[in-house]
Image (spheres, rainbow, N blue to C red):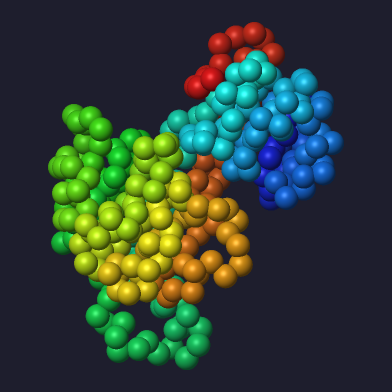
Amino acid sequence: MNVIWHYPAGPDLTRRLAALRDRGLSVSICEPSDRERFRELLPETEAIWHLLEPLTAEIIASGPRLRLIQKIGVGVNTIDIEAARRGGVAVCNMPGTNTRAVAEMTLLLVLSALRRANRLDAAARTGWDLPPAFQDHAGEVCGRTVGLVGYGAVPGCLAPMLRAMGARVLYASRSPKPDAVGERVSLDALLAASDVVSLHVPLAPDTERLIDAGAIARMKPGAILVNTARGALVDEAALAEALRSGRLGAAGLDVLDTEPPAAGHPLFDLDNVVCSPHAAWMTRETLDRSLAVAVENCRRLAAGEELLHRVA
């Protein structure tokens, strides 16, 4: 079966993907930026192991042998689901494979924003001195209120860590979570009470720009916003203005509305912003779990068996 791994691959992953030939899979590594190679591979491709680059109706229609789009992760907002249905292409995701990695990255961004890790790193490299005003900003998790917007697998993993560190945990969700760690409150109550607000909801029409200028105005002055979900949950212009003015204290962002962002993105000029390039999921352990699911679904596809975690 011909498969495209639609993302860069380091030396070890390249070897692991090549070894899948022994299991009947010919996996071609294609970086998203190499659109010409992608177009060349697509006509003979039966499965795409998809990460972040959008798969449009045009792309799906250009794969006459395509039978499976396997999302490496959970969110499928970058896939034209209706076009896949029309073309008879199955779409699957893999809930749970990156939960631990994303939860740990969220905690890393919370801590980095609280301690202004980017400033510490810069100071260590350029003279060892911190400005006196730094003392007014650096803080600890213990004693603070952390609000989790959404309560799926990642918050379920993260909340016990936060509580063990001494934080008060709030969460806002559409339905009660009987086993949740933390107190369920309305979104408005969470925004008003939280020192740190962390986003954990999928991107959908009713969540796009969930954190807009109005939501930011309802947040606690000096609060920190953390986003490891989807960039379009946040109005970035409003966020930049709030961070610039001091209305919000800091932000920790693994995702942005447009990825990769254009040069000169306004958030990159702010020293109270800590960023990572949509890499919260990226650990060796996540890749181990993800490849196991992807390989199994290709086996099932070839055997005509029911696929794991099919969403369309």
> Which corner quadrant holds the C terminus?
top right
Is residue 301 placed above or below 187 in the rendered structure?
A: above
The number of numbered discs placed on residues in the rendered structure image is: 0
The residue at the point 63 percent across, 43 percent down is 53
Residue 240 to residue 75: above or below: below
Q: If the image is split into quadrants, where does the N terminus sit? A: top right
| Residue 195 shows up from this direction | no
Decide which of 284, 274 is in the foreground and name it: 274
41 up-or-down from 109: above or below: above
Nearer to me, 49 or 270 = 270
Q: Say whether residue 263 is visible.
A: yes
Position of residue 254 measured from the top left corner of the image (x, y, whole percent): 47, 55
Rendered location of residue 268, percent (x, y): 50, 69
Of all residues, the one furthest to the top in this rendering is: 304
Please provide percent x and percent y for residue 25. Answer: 74, 26
Q: Where in the figure is residue 231, as x and y percent of width and height?
A: 46, 51
Q: Residue furthest right?
A: 40
Looking at the image, residue 52 sits to the left or right of residue 59; the answer is left
Quadrant of res 166: bottom left
Q: As rendered, which of 237 and 76 lies closer to the eye?
A: 237
- Determine which quarter of the picture holds residue 246: bottom left
